Amino acid sequence: MPSTDPVGGLGTDLKARAAHTPARVGGRDAARVAAQMLAPALAAGLPAGRRATMALAERSAADRRATGLLTALRDRYGPGPLRLDLGGRHLAVVLHAEDARHVLDGTPDPYAPATRAGGAATAHFRPHGVLTSHGTRRDERRPFNEGVLEYGQQLHSLAPHFVRAVREETGRLLGAATAGDGEIGWSAFREAWDRTARRVVLGDAARDDTDLTAALGRLRSARTATGPGDRFARRVRDHLDHAEPGSLAVEIARGAASAAGGAGAVDPVGQVPHWLLAFEEAGTAVFRTLAVLATHEPQTGQVRNELAVTDLTEPHLLPYTRACVLESVRLWPTTPFLVRESVRDTVWGEETLPGGTEFLIYAPLFHRDEALPYADRFTPEIWMDGTAQDTEALMPFGAGPGECPGQDLVLLVASTTLAALLERHTYLPYRPGLLRPDRPLPRTLDHFGLRFVALPHISRGWL
């Protein structure tokens, strides 16, 4: 009999597992799933009004309500995926970690990451991105992305250039804060982070190209690529045509030249929007990590110990600081939904689900499962001692062949940014009670509402 443990077993061969049989939910329960899980998550991710919806989501404890609902439905219907039809779409909400890994390990066939609904929503601004690619196109674009981003390598070959960009932009951020009232809010941090991201991806010349970032934001909000899409593509192409040493833009040109089928098949310009969007989400994770470290002294002490024995002007892995970022993403996934669409009929237990079924994996359900002893606590140590790696319920960057190819690069830039922020400063949050270590951490954290006062950190050796 398959395990009914919500978080699944450890160390089992996933290929040998039988999927749990799905259950068809009633109309009332389907409406509750749509209202309490799908609608809040989609609204929080929309560019327009995102600040307001995130604040509302935090006040209403949206993720806690959603995970509570799915847990209750799992108790009622069993551990198999919940089948429901909404707006003509066949959906299956995955409730068990084994089933989640079964789907993710089956990417891209039979479970494709390029869904019809997702493709329709994003095709106007990233039509040639790997996440919206099928078949041979994906087979060409995925290796290209892995090669440029150096997937599987924790220390990118261009790390010295990235470290320089991070330290310069973080230094300017802190300099501006200390010259004023010492406050750092989301807007100021986001501007510094965007400058860093543009330098990493496109080179130093893109540092002040705020119009590029604004164009991408408008493009996400638009329903068509006509106009804003053309302007965005021209700006990206111009930066790629003048690629600077030390940026991903140089690697993009080299990778495109050697890619199977040539640059036309890969479309280097078409890959950049996804990378910039990934950095946007990573910035959210860094800011949340800073917030939780500001209220968790033991973990901050561990970070400082790591920094004290490291030459931060040079690239380093910073494993504990990196673990803090991973733990922040576990607690507050920047991408709460992992979605796959079956390209053909698939057998699940005693049932067959039709091709075109969209499988929804709601990460907070697994990351905050009450069966995990650290579910609502900030515990970076699980990423250091193998606990997280051996727990299939945890998938901060996805899993399987569709795992984020840029995760190592993102974690490098994120941990380096935190190191630069914490090297000589302490942060006092405006809402210290929100993230108290003696209470369960909130399931939803509005990063727009986070603010700190940055104070010089004085310790032995810094006088």
Image (tube, grey):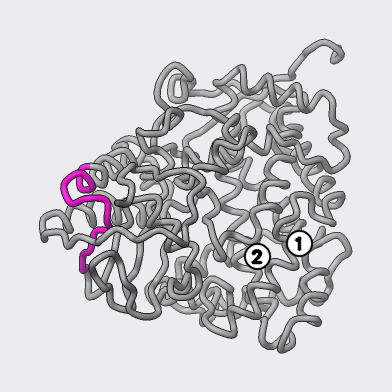
Task: Write down the quadrant of residue 232 in the picture.
Answer: bottom right
Question: Could you tell me how far apart the alpha carbons at marks 2 and 1 are, in whole angstroms?
Answer: 8 Å
436 above or below 23?
above
279 displayed left or right of 32: right
For image coordinates 40% across by 31% down, the residue present is 442
- Identify residue for label 1: 206
Q: Secondary structure at mark 2?
A: helix
Q: Secondary structure at mark 1?
A: helix
The reply to whether the C-beta atoms of the residues labelled 2 and 1 are less than 8 Å apart is: yes
Residue sitting nearer the eye, 374 or 223: 374
In percent of width and height, residue 242 lies at: 84, 73
In percent of width and height, residue 452 lies at: 58, 27
40 displayed left or right of 414: left
- Identify residue for label 2: 212
Is 28 contained in the magenta span? no
66 displayed left or right of 281: left
For image coordinates 56% across by 40% down, the residue present is 186
In the image, which residues are magenta?
A: 72-85
Amino acid type at image mark 2: Leu
Amino acid type at image mark 1: Ala
In percent of width and height, residue 268 lies at: 70, 77
Answer with mark 2 or mark 1, whichever residue precedes in sequence: 1
Is 81 contained in the magenta span? yes
- Category of crowding for the residue at label 1, using alpha-carbon neighbours closer than 10 angstroms: few (below 14), some (14–19), many (at least 20): many
Residue sitting nearer the eye, 43 or 409: 409
For image coordinates 60% across by 80% down, the residue present is 230
For image coordinates 36% across by 57% down, the residue present is 42
